[in-house]
Amino acid sequence: SQTIHQWPATLVQPVGSPLSLECTVEGTSNPNLYWYRQAAGRGLQLLFYSVGIGQISSEVPQNLSASRPQDRQFILSSKKLLLSDSGFYLCAWARTGELFFGEGSRLTVL
Amino acid sequence: SQQGEEDPQALSIQEGENATMNCSYKTSINNLQWYRQNSGRGLVHLILIRSNEREKHSGRLRVTLDTSKKSSSLLITASRAADTASYFCAVHSGAGSYQLTFGKGTKLSVIP
């Protein structure tokens, strides 16, 4: 069966510090992968999606970036965090039109 | 934006009652999906309804789709305290690589 893992689950970072959130999928090959952000009390905002290794599409211009160094690994990064980067970050993969989400990474920028 | 909009934003009912949530969208879609999110957790897929379908059932869930009104509803029958969660609709418009756009969700509270 397929599983998706995200880490870290919780992160508290100072403004201006770097960020790296990781997501890995097991049990499937060449998945479409997605990063969403959910701000408090708001819906999900699509940040990046990837259809293959090294292929990244950005939906929202910001100080975040994404990379896909391996088929089943998706990384969300920032060189310098802003207060507005705080939120709940969700990684997902797609199969037959449905999205399967990880448990999320909660980022607080102070 | 193709984002779905859920209504109401929050809903509180007694255990055993039915809960109905609505979703509206703006343009044509390939399919519409409903997801559930327990507090602080990831989203879980509940049901997908295609644009040529009008109604779909899964256990205690019933989803309807009215493409002429660009709206969908999710009915949870005989609600349980464990149904307490946020429910999101997501629409797929079929442009390019597969993407879904989500609404802000309906927060459902089921009181035991």
Image (cartoon, rainbow, N blue to C red):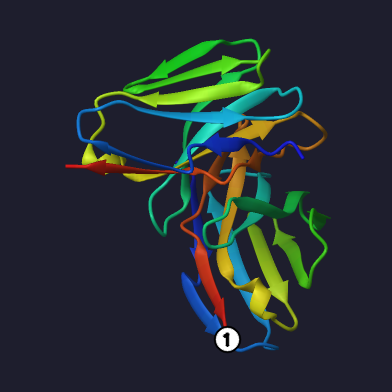
Between B81 and B10, the residue placed more toward the observer is B10
Q: Is residue A102 above or below residue B12?
A: below
The answer to whether residue B89 is visible is no
- The image quadrant that residue B39 belongs to is bottom left
Q: Is residue A90 above or below residue B107?
A: below
Amino acid type of the residue that numbered disc 1 sits on in the rendered structure: Leu
**Quadrant where the C terminus of chain B is found in the figure:** top left
Chain under label 1? A
The answer to whether residue A63 is visible is yes
Q: Which residue is depicted at the point 53% across and 62% down?
A: A40
Q: Going by the image, does A105 lie left or right of A59?
A: left
Q: Is residue A90 above or below residue B8?
A: below
How many numbered marks are there?
Answer: 1
Q: Which residue is depicted at the point 22% across and 36% down?
A: B14
Q: Which residue is depicted at the point 65% across and 79% down?
A: A83
Q: Position of residue B99 (x, y in %)?
A: 71, 39
Q: Position of residue B21 (x, y in %)?
A: 45, 30
Q: Going by the image, does B43 lie left or right of B3?
A: left
Q: Going by the image, does B71 lie left or right of B35?
A: right
**Quadrant where the N terminus of chain B is found in the figure:** top right
On the image, numbered disc 1 is attached to which residue? Answer: A110
Q: Position of residue A63 (x, y in %)?
A: 78, 73
Q: Position of residue A108 (x, y in %)?
A: 54, 77
Mark 1 element type = loop
Between B1 and B58, the residue placed more toward the observer is B1
